[in-house]
Amino acid sequence: MRNLTYYVATSLDGKIASPQGDWADFLSEGDHMNVILTEFGDAIPTHVHAHIGTSPSNTLFDTVIMGWNTYTPALDAGITSPYQHLRQIVVSHKSHDLPADLELTHDPVTTVKDLKDQPGKDIWLAGGGLLASSLLPLIDRLILKINPVVFAAGIPLFAGADYMPTQFALTELRTFSSGVAIAEYARQN
């Protein structure tokens, strides 16, 4: 069975973006970037790979699922298919015209359950916080890129959820001189 992995950058206070949905305050330079490029390159947009002269490895993920608000910054920048190297699924409660290589779902829980039963690599949950909350019972792994910044306000890792304690065990923690830490967790219950 495939795992659903929530791989996301976060602030020290658990925010994945500013109140406006921006993530420009996360560090994009530093010694942690080599690990992100080499080990988590599947989660880098295709156009960024082309710009920096790298290729996605497709060793971790073959599918990405993202909420509409996670997808729209790419769309606003004229990038209609940000992860061409992955199967791309966008979640929205509204109907949208999407490019042929993107899929739209109104039911992320059923979609992820179906994906987990199909052969393939792991499924990357790219965000946002509302989608992560709805999929929390299905998340198998958390990989958090913890940035040395406090937002004080913004979009939380898990937004709009009822109290739902879910145990995860730390499986790996790497720290970098940039101040970024990459913490990996596996679901316990």
Image: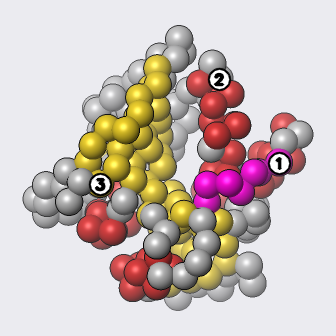
Main SS of residues in magenta:
loop
Q: Nearer the viewer, mark 1 or mark 3?
A: 3
Report the amino acid beneath label 1.
Answer: Ser
Q: Nearer the viewer, mark 2 or mark 3?
A: 3
The local secondary structure at tag 1 comes to: loop
**Other residues around mark 2 within 10 Å, as few (<14) / some (14–19) / many (≥20):** few
Cα distance in 3D space between marks 2 and 3: 30 Å
Residue 172 occupies quadrant: top left
In the displayed structure image, the side of residue 17 where residue 87 appears, left or right: right
Tags 2 and 3 touching, CB below 8 Å: no
Residue at the extreme left: 163
Residue closest to the eye, 186 or 96: 186
Please state the extent of the stretch shown in magenta in the rendering. 55-61
Location of mark 2 (residue): 29
Number of the label disc, if any, that sits on residue 84:
none
Cα distance in 3D space between marks 1 and 3: 30 Å
Residue 131 occupies quadrant: bottom left
Residue closest to the eye, 1 or 109: 1
Number of the label disc, if any, that sits on residue 55:
1
**Other residues around mark 3 within 10 Å, as few (<14) / some (14–19) / many (≥20):** some
Cα distance in 3D space between marks 2 and 1: 19 Å
